[in-house]
Image (cartoon, rainbow, N blue to C red):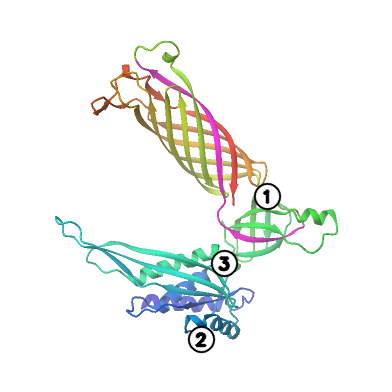
């Protein structure tokens, strides 16, 4: 009850604070589910959805519960929405639906006789225009997890689902949009701040806005403006943004539409100097202690300025040996010459699985082992266009060497390999490696 009163007060205060924001689109939340068993508090779920919309700073929330068509049959839905929109000047409707809870019961085994329950429910938001046209729908399934004899707070579970649905709708169905005049660059400032829902870290796709038929070569050039910008700083009435990709022509009028986080895919190639300890009684090239490993790497990462997450899958080969591994890193991406030149710095963890041929007839499978390392990387990213680029990378690693190999003999038993059964008794990964490759930006 206290939480419900708090949400109502918060909503009232927010409505007063936003009363003068007549330029914001007006949204109304209408519940369309029937809760015969009273699992949820309908008004609390509506208040939760309205609170998230208000906190975004992008909507004016309208309470339409007093309208005669607030409740009604699905067959009359379009007529009802049009009537409400006309009487309350509503631009967008969210129809909120929550399914009855579904409980999965497991009775365990005869030895334990434990009974466990897992409760799930679906929360759906359907979004309509004032004319009753469907904009889109979002569904989230919420699980309580495995429970014993304790009861599940269904109202809290439904509230969590409502929050997720509204948050997804802000980027997937109701993206933020505004226009501004391009001045300077690559950092741009415009009179739209937190009061209008523009927050630090947001990413926008930008396209030129036509002012009519171009009358000069300069106006033709301005129509080529396009790309991605990221909000770097924002106060109540203004914000600054930096180019991530593309090109904006000074003097052009552009429209910015909220975009999800851009990503970068890269395919790289590296030659790694590798120290090896040969197996016993090898001669010639097979007895060399220095080898060059060829490695290919496929990686993907976030492409905003600032916090950076990167994951990589790589594979390498030596004569009579192959490897496959993964690497994950967290770091930062810094603009050197925005948007074309960026520097990515990261640190993380690497795991690699290695397999080599064996020299003994009694061994029925390849010898295998694994190595682990902590990594630090430095990546220079040069984008030749808004999507394609070149990456130069350096990776340093400190970790284990591959010196304990496992084999399976002809009897099917697993054991440690002997040096005389291997071509490589030990492999020491390169402390520092360099690679070059091609990159593609996804947005």
Of circles 1 and 2, which is in front? 2
Magenta segment, which residues?
A: 251-279
Q: Looking at the picture, does residue 430 appear above or below residue 119?
A: above
Crowd band around label 1 with a 10 angstrom C-alpha radius: few (<14), some (14–19), many (20+) = many
Q: Nearer the viewer, residue 403 or 341?
A: 403
Q: Earlier in the sequence, mark 2 or mark 3?
A: 2
Query: Mark 1 = which residue?
Result: 246
**Alpha-carbon distance for marks 1 and 2?**
48 Å
Q: Secondary structure at mark 3?
A: loop
Q: Nearer the viewer, residue 233 or 330?
A: 330
**Alpha-carbon distance for marks 3 and 1?**
24 Å
270 in magenta: yes
Q: Is residue 437 left or right of residue 216?
A: left
Crowd band around label 3 with a 10 angstrom C-alpha radius: few (<14), some (14–19), many (20+) = some
Residue at position x 45%, y 36% from top? 375
Q: Looking at the picture, does residue 115 appear above or below residue 403?
A: below
Q: Is residue 97 left or right of residue 209?
A: left
Query: Mark 3 = which residue?
Result: 174
Residue 24 horizontal/vertical position (percent) = 61, 73
Q: Secondary structure at mark 1?
A: strand
Q: Earlier in the sequence, mark 3 or mark 1?
A: 3
């Amino acid at each position: 009850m206290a939480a419900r009163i708090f949400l109502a007060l918060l909503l009232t205060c927010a409505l007063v604070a936003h009363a003068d924001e007549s330029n914001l689109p007006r949204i109304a939340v209408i519940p369309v589910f029937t809760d015969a068993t009273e699992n949820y508090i309908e008004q609390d779920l509506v208040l939760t959805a309205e609170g998230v919309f208000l906190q975004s700073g992008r909507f004016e929330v309208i309470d339409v519960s007093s309208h005669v068509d607030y409740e009604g049959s699905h067959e009359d839905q379009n007529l009802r929405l049009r009537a409400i929109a006309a009487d309350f000047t509503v631009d967008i409707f969210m129809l909120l639906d929550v399914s009855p809870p579904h409980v999965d019961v497991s009775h365990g085994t005869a030895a334990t006789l434990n009974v466990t329950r897992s409760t799930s429910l679906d929360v759906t938001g359907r979004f309509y225009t004032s004319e009753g046209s469907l904009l889109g729908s979002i569904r989230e399934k919420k699980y309580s997890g495995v429970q014993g004899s304790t009861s599940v707070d269904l109202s809290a579970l439904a509230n969590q689902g409502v929050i997720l649905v509204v948050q997804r709708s802000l980027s997937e169905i109701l993206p933020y949009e505004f226009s501004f005049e391009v001045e300077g660059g690559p950092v741009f400032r415009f009179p739209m701040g937190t009061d209008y829902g523009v927050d630090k870290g947001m990413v926008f796709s930008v396209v030129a806005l036509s002012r009519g038929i171009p009358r000069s070569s300069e106006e033709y050039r301005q129509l080529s403006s396009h790309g991605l910008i990221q909000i770097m700083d924002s106060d109540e009435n203004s914000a600054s943004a930096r180019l991530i990709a593309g090109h904006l022509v000074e003097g052009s009028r552009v429209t910015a539409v909220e975009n999800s986080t851009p990503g970068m895919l890269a395919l790289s190639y590296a030659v790694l100097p590798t120290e090896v300890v040969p197996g016993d009684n090898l001669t010639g090239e097979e007895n060399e202690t220095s080898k060059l490993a060829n490695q290919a790497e496929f990686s993907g990462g976030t492409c905003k300025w600032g916090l950076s997450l990167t994951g990589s899958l790589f594979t390498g080969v030596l004569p009579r040996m192959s490897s496959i591994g993964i690497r994950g890193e967290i770091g930062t991406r810094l603009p050197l010459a925005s948007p074309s030149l960026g520097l990515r710095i990261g640190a993380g963890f690497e795991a690699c699985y290695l397999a080599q041929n064996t020299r003994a007839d009694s061994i029925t499978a390849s010898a295998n082992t694994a190595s682990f390392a902590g990594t630090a990387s430095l990546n220079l990213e040069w984008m030749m266009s808004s999507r394609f680029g070149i990456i130069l990378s350096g990776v340093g690693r400190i970790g284990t060497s591959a010196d304990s190999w496992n084999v399976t003999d002809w009897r099917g038993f697993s054991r440690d390999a002997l040096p005389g059964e291997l071509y490589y008794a030990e492999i020491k990964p390169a402390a520092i490696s360099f690679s070059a490759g091609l990159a593609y930006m996804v947005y």
